[in-house]
Image (cartoon, rainbow, N blue to C red):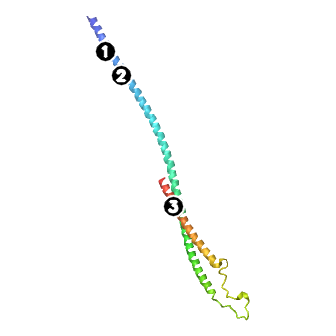
Amino acid sequence: KMIKDLIVRLMEEANEEAEHKGWCDTELSTNEQTRKEKTEAVETLHAEIDQLEASIAKLTEDITELTKAVAELDAAMAEATKLRQEEKEKNKATIKDAQEAQTAVAQALTVLKEFYAKAGDATAFVQQQPEMPEIFDSPYKGMQSENGGVVGMLEVIESDFARLEADTKAAEASAQKEYDTFMTDSKVD
């Protein structure tokens, strides 16, 4: 009977060991599968980290380039503002000079026209001669009508100053518009 008990006990132990081995095999298989999944997840995360680090490096490079571009644009805007101010002052002085010149020429024209209007009545150098040559049969009134004379030249000069003033004002308006457009575009960029 003891041998039978021993055999039964050994059989029970063998069954328990077989069950335990089955459980161990199952656990090993499950652990191996979990380990593979976790390894794949780690590899995926490492790849994602590498990709994000490359993206960070690229974005950092882009930021550096854009910062440099913004600095260059700011410098260009400052230079454009400086040049615009200088041009504006020059145009302002040119317009003022042209207006003053027009006033001066208009006054000179008035004086000359009055003078020539009175010149026809002048008889200061008329001499009494018994017989006057044909050349001096009328008082000398100057050469007003010959080729436009001084009056004609002054009228041309006056129109030149008026044209200079108009051209300068148009150039000033155009330059201001270009400057405003440049500044607006630069601020957008």
- The residue under label 1 is 16
Q: Relative to residue 98, is residue 25 drawn left or right?
A: left
| Name of the residue lying farthest toward the left | 1
Q: Relative to residue 16, is residue 85 drawn left or right?
A: right
In the image, residue 112 sits, relative to residue 183, either above or below, namely below
Q: x%, y% of residue 116? A: 62, 84
Give the mark nearest the N terminus, 3 or 2: 2
Whether residue 114 appears in this view of the structure is yes
Q: x%, y% of residue 179? A: 52, 60
Question: Which amino acid, by three-letter code, is at mark 2?
Answer: Glu
The structure residue drawn at horizontal position 59% and vertical position 84%, both measured from the top left corner, is 114
Report, in whole angstroms, how far the alpha carbon at label 2 lies from the one at label 1: 16 Å
- The residue under label 3 is 177
- Of 10 and 90, nearer the camera is 90
Q: Relative to residue 121, is residue 89 drawn left or right?
A: left
| Classed neighbour count for the residue bearing mark 1: other residues with Cα under 10 Å, few (<14), some (14–19), many (≥20) | few
- Of 42 and 7, nearer the camera is 42
